[in-house]
Each structure stands twice: as C-alpha cells, then as structure tokens.
C-alpha cells in the first residue's frame, strides 16, 4: 500500500495532499522507554545472578541465566517492532478533497475511513496535560454528519493547526458547493431581465 | 533434555511466526517503499543476531550436569 493507492482510490486525480500525519513521536518514545528500562533491569539481574552463582560455586547455572536473558532480549526486540508497526501504520491524510483515516487495530484488523469536507459539522482540538502542552500535541475531533459520527486524530502534533486547516478546507468545500447554484441564479436573473440572447 | 529441545523448538516457531507477521505488515502497508525496506532489513538483521546469540547460549547449557544437580 502506498500513498497513491489511498489518495487516488476514487476518480479524483486533482487531489492535493496537505498533510500526512502519524501520532506524535513522544507517544512512541514513552512506550520504548518502558522497554529500555525493562532491558536494563533484566541485564542488571543477570549480571547480579551470574556474580552470585560464581561466588557460591554453582557455575553450571550461569549459561542458563545468560540464555534466559538473551531470550528476554529477543522478546523485547520483537515487541518493540509490534509497537513500531502499530505506530507507523496509523496514518491520517489531509487532502484538498477529504480526510483519510487509516487505523491499524492490532495485527489483523485495519480500518480505512474517509470524510468529505462538506460533511464536517464541527472541529475541536484538545491538548491535555503537561507533556502534551510542552510537546504541543493532542487530539483533533471532527464531528460529521455521516455514519462515522466522529473522526479522531489521536495524539498528533500541532492539533490547533490541523483544526484550522480542516475548518478552512470545510469552508472552501461548502463555498464551492454553494457557488454553482448562485451562478445558475445569476444567469436566470440576467435572462429574465434582458430576455434570451 | 528432550523436553527442553521440544520447548525450544516451540519457542523458535513462535518467534518465526511473529517475525513473519511484522515483515508482512511492514512490506504491505507502509506508505513509503524505502522506509519499509530499511526497517525490514534492520529488523531481520538484528533479529537474526539475537537468535544466534540465544542459540549459542542454549547449546552451551550443560544439560547433563543440570540433570545430575536436579537428581542429587
């Protein structure tokens, strides 16, 4: 899957991509920090256990300790990549025509939803807490008139700018929609006043 | 010893399945082909290294001495 397949899945090929968003890096880093702390802890435990077994003379168990440590390292490494895949494959794309939300839910569930700007009713950005304030990331909620109900950008950077962008594109879409009728009315008024040409 | 070998084989199988799942998702769903390729190469190389280290430690476990230790 690449960007072209997501964006040009409909007939529109004039679509301009304004933003491709992932969750903020701090969201990922906070989970990796826990894994790093775990690895430091098990390394310390392994070294302590090896030193203790050396001092008591039970050296046959030292390879078992190292084996279990390397086993836990391998598990932690693969789990890190589970976290990375979950982070990397959650994507929000803001284009000139719509918002696309691609959400990876676990490994065997993937949701892709689209929202046209004319269906946008309300956009709210939310930054909560010290960490989000310091790093300027948060949630953007897009209230829609469609079946989806609420569209959510979760833990994205600069949520206020995204909110402004979506509102601007919403107004643009609405005025484009309004324009054809206004144009037809103007033509009709002109024809009524001046007669057919 | 046979029980340990069986357990290690089952563990290796689980690791292999997990790796296949990760690689499949990276290659299939990544927006950018280059990023998908680099992350896959990084993942595979380090996973192989960790597996080899783990295998080395497993092979060096003195099972015979541990059985004697367990029996005594």
Image (cartoon, rainbow, N blue to C red):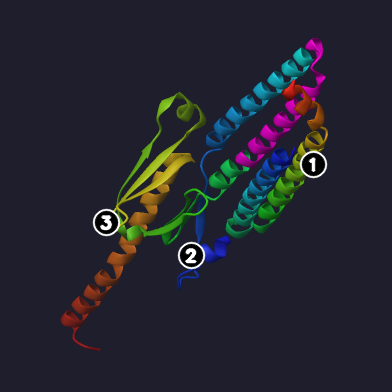
Residue B53 placement, left or right of A172:
right
Q: Which of marks 3 and 1 is in front?
A: 1
Q: Residue furthest left?
A: A192
Image coordinates of residue A144 in percent, x first then y, are 30, 53
Marks 3,1: beta carbons within 8 A = no
Q: Earlier in the sequence, mark 2 or mark 3?
A: 2
Residue A59 placement, left or right of A9:
right
Chain bearing mark 2: A
Q: What segment is highlighted magenta in the picture?
A: A54-79
Q: Residues within 10 Å of mark 1 (few under 14, many from 20)?
A: few
> Regarding mark 2 in the picture, which secondary structure is present there?
loop
- The residue at which mark 1 appears reads as B52
The quadrant in which the C terminus of chain B is found is top right
**B3 in relation to B69, above or below:** below
- The residue at which mark 3 appears reads as A145
B6 or B68, which lies in front?
A: B68
- The residue at which mark 2 appears reads as A15
Q: Which of marks 1 and 2 is in front?
A: 1
The quadrant in which the N terminus of chain B is found is top right
A147 or A142, which lies in front?
A: A147
Q: Is residue A77 magenta?
A: yes
All told, the count of numbered labels is 3
Q: Residues within 10 Å of mark 3 (few under 14, many from 20)?
A: some
Residue that appears at 50% across and 27% down = A134
B31 or A122, which lies in front?
A: B31
B51 or A53, which lies in front?
A: A53
Residue that appears at 66% across and 27% down = A39
Image coordinates of residue A24 in percent, x first then y, are 52, 39
**A21 in relation to A74, above or below:** below
How far separated are the C-alphas under marks 1 and 2?
49 Å
> Regarding mark 1 in the picture, which secondary structure is present there?
helix
Q: In which quarter of the image is residue A36?
A: top right
């Amino acid at each position: 899957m690449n960007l072209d397949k997501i964006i040009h899945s409909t007939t529109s090929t004039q679509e301009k991509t304004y933003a491709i968003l992932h969750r903020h890096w701090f969201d990922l880093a906070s989970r990796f920090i826990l894994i790093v702390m775990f690895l430091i802890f098990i390394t310390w435990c392994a070294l302590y256990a090896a030193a203790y077994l050396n001092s008591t003379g039970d050296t046959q168990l030292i390879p078992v300790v190292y084996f279990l440590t390397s086993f836990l390292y391998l598990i932690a490494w693969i789990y890190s990549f589970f976290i990375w895949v979950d982070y990397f494959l959650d994507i929000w794309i803001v284009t000139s025509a719509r918002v696309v939300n691609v959400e990876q839910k676990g490994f065997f569930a993937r949701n892709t939803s689209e929202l046209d700007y004319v269906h946008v009713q309300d956009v709210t950005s939310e930054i909560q807490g010290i960490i989000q304030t310091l790093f300027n990331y948060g949630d953007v909620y897009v209230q829609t008139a469609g079946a989806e109900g609420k569209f959510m950008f979760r833990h994205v950077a600069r949520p206020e700018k995204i909110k402004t962008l979506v509102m601007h594109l919403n107004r643009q879409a609405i005025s484009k929609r309004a324009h054809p009728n206004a144009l037809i009315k103007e033509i009709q008024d002109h024809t009524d006043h001046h007669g057919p040409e | 010893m046979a029980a340990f070998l069986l357990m290690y084989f089952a563990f290796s199988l689980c690791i292999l399945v997990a790796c296949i799942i990760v690689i499949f998702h990276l290659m299939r769903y990544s927006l950018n082909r280059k990023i998908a390729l680099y992350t896959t190469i990084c993942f595979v190389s380090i996973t192989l290294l960790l597996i080899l280290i783990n295998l080395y430690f497993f092979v060096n476990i003195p099972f015979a001495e541990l059985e004697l230790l367990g029996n005594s």
